[in-house]
Image (cartoon, helix red, strand yellow):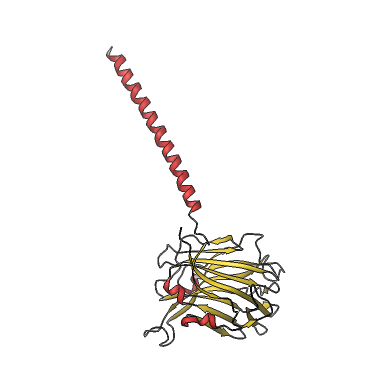
Amino acid sequence: MKTKKNFLFIYDNLILTLVFIVVILFICSNENKVSAHYFQEDIPKNTLGTELWTAGHEGGDQSEWSLNDGGGEFNSGTGNSAVSSEVAHTGKYSLKMSINTSNGEGHGTRNFRWNELGEHDDLIFTQYFFFPNRIDLDGENDWFNLIQTKGVKFAPGGAGTGPDQINDPHFVLGLKVRGGAGSGGANFLSLSDLQKFWGSQPDESWEAPSGINLPVKKWVKIQMRIIQDRGNRGRILVWQDDQLIIDTRLRNTLRPEVDTNMYSINVYADKTYPTTANIYVDDVSIHLPATP
C-alpha cells in the first residue's frame, strides 16, 4: 500500500512538473514574440511634429539660412550657392549649389544650420533634391559629401571668439556610384560614420539597398532623423521618398569632446565627372518628431 502511495505521489509530482515546464515554455515563447514584435515596431518614424525652421527660397535670397544667426553658407575652392529660378520644387525658386573640379583638390559649398541641433536632441531634417545629371567620381578619390553633421568644439572663449578647437565631420550622407567610380552606374546614397577623425576605430558605412537609386531630372525627397547622444544611444535614419533606406541602430552620434553638432547640405568633392557639378535643393525644413 505504501509503495502504491509513493508511486502516486511521484506520478502526481511528475505531472505537475511537466505542466509547469509547458507553462514556462509557453510564456517564454510569447514573451519572445512580443519582444521581437516590439523591436520591429520600435523603429523611429519620419512623422513630422512642430516645425522649427524652413527655407523655401521664395524671397529670392538665402536669408532664411542665416535666420537668428543660426546658419549660413561656407565655401572652399570653386564652391558656390545661389538662389535660382531654373527649377523649383514649389514656387519659383530653389537653391543651386555648384562646384567645378577641373583642377582636383577639394571644392565645396556648404549651407549650414546649427541652432536646432544645439537646442534639441531628436530632429527630422527634410530636403528635396534635383539632380540634372548623374555624377561620376574618380576611382582614386571617390567621395562626395551631400549632407553632413560636424562636431565642433569652440574656442576657449566660446563661439565666435576665435578659431574652433575642433571642427570635423562625423556623419556624412554621400553619393556613390553603382558598380564603382567610372562604371557609368546610377548614383545612390551612402551614410558613413567617419571615425578616422575621432579615434582608432575604423569608419563604418551603410548603403541604400540595391535598386534604390537617385533619380535624374526629378525631385527626390530625402529625410534624416538624427537622435543625438554622447554615449551609445544615438541613432540616424535616412528615408528616400518616405522609404527607410538606412538605419545605423544605436551608436554614438554626438562626440563627448565637442560642444555641439552642426548640420549642412553640400556639394563637396575632389573630382567629379562632369567636372562641373550642379545640384538643386528646395523646401528644406527642420522639425521635431511627432509625439506618439
- Residue at (46% x, 81% y) in the render: 68
Quadrant position of the N terminus in the picture: top left
Residue 177: percent from the left, percent from the top?
66, 68
Given the current orientation, which residue lies at the most extreme left position? 2
Q: Position of residue 73 (x, y in %)?
A: 55, 83
Task: Reply above or below: 90 against 248.
Answer: below
Q: Quadrant of residue 117?
A: bottom left
| Above or below, comparing residue 34 to residue 152 in the picture | above
Outermost residue toward the right in this view: 184
Whole-percent x and y of residue 159? 41, 83
x and y percentages locating residue 273 in the rendered image = 70, 77
Q: Nearer the viewer, residue 56 or 187?
A: 56
Q: Give the image quarter of residue 84.
A: bottom right
> With 247 as the anchor, is 214 left or right in this view?
right
Point 37% across, 25% down: residue: 15
Position of 78 relative to 188 (above/below)? below
Residue 146 relative to residue 41: left or right: right
Instruction: Count all numbered tags in the image, as a single digit.
Output: 0
In the visual, does 8 lie left or right of 72?
A: left
Between residues 163 and 91, which one lies in front from this camera angle?
Answer: 91
- The one nearer the camera, 2 or 266, is 266
The structure residue drawn at horizontal position 50% and vertical position 52%, both measured from the top left corner, is 41
Q: Closer to the camera, 43 or 77?
A: 43
